[in-house]
Amino acid sequence: MSYANILVSVDFAEAAANRVRLAAALARRFDATLTGAAAAEVPAPPFAHDIRDAQAQYERTKAKILQELERVEAVFARCAGAAPRTAWSGGTDRPFAHLVERGRAADLLVVGGTAETEIDPSPFGVALGPVLMEAGRPVLVVPPETSREPGSRIVVAWKDTPEARRAVSGALPFLRSADRVFLVTIGEDARLDGAEEVAAHLILHGAAATAHLLTATVSDGAEILRFAREQQADLIVMGAYGHSRLQEWAFGGATRSILAASTICCLMAH
């Protein structure tokens, strides 16, 4: 398995340029096509005299959004130069819905994000929760200040759950090429023998993997981050845990704390 098509979310946030450059570097590493994606929904007019007036207002707003999309595409074009091949996908839809739709033809999604539950926090910004919940693809979450290409030293936060299994499977191209892979398990039900079995599986794939049992002194998320910093890791691989509620995504405790505090990239799967 490798990544043939990487999809990156693009917007006007300060962090977007670094995110695109990082995604372009990954596209170069894996010889993948890098596709930039951005969208904004055309809102219904708040007030209109009649149907023709409403339609005219709608068309004017749509034209402005299309102009803004050209500016977003220019950000992508300016920052994606390292990628061997590029493509662009703009749309007039909810940003997260557009990204999820385009994700059907991608192996990896690259997004900025935090643990917040808001959907589409800015005109072209994509909320992380709905993307993780609906994409059905591994999602690389890039913190705002991060520009370092990830994948040299990786911490895998292992739990014997479908989410963690999907995250490990989706991260295999990273894991196989990493210098070190630290597979850690933590919590009351954590078992080192299970982690060792997964580490042995990763070794068969060519990963330099070792298993570690951690004990949380404060919280599971804080201990995983402490261990990652201690090992000078540049990527955390983990399942994304939580539930949807009224079209919002409420993250589980460890997932939320790592997303809120991590300064390195996280590859996650739900």
Image (spheres, rainbow, N blue to C red):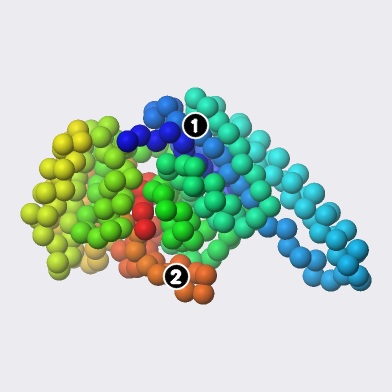
User: Where does residue 188 sit, x and y in percent of width and height?
Assistant: 15, 68
Dot 2: within a 10 Å radius of its alpha carbon, few (fewer than 14), some, or many (20 or more) residues? few
Quadrant including the N terminus: top left
Do we see residue 146 in this rendering? Answer: no
**Vertical arrangement, residue 222 with respect to residue 231, above or below:** below
SS at mark 2? Answer: strand
Do we see residue 57 in this rendering? Answer: yes
Indicate which disc, 1 or 2, sits on the residue closer to the N terminus: 1
* The residue positioned farthest toward the front in the image shown: 104
> Residue at 33% of width from left, 68% of height from top?
253
Dot 1: within a 10 Å radius of its alpha carbon, few (fewer than 14), some, or many (20 or more) residues? many
> Residue at 86% of width from left, 65% of height from top?
54
Image disc number at residue 244: 2
| Image side of residue 221 versus residue 117, left or right | left
Residue picked out by circle 1 = 33
| Image side of residue 163 versus residue 97, left or right | left
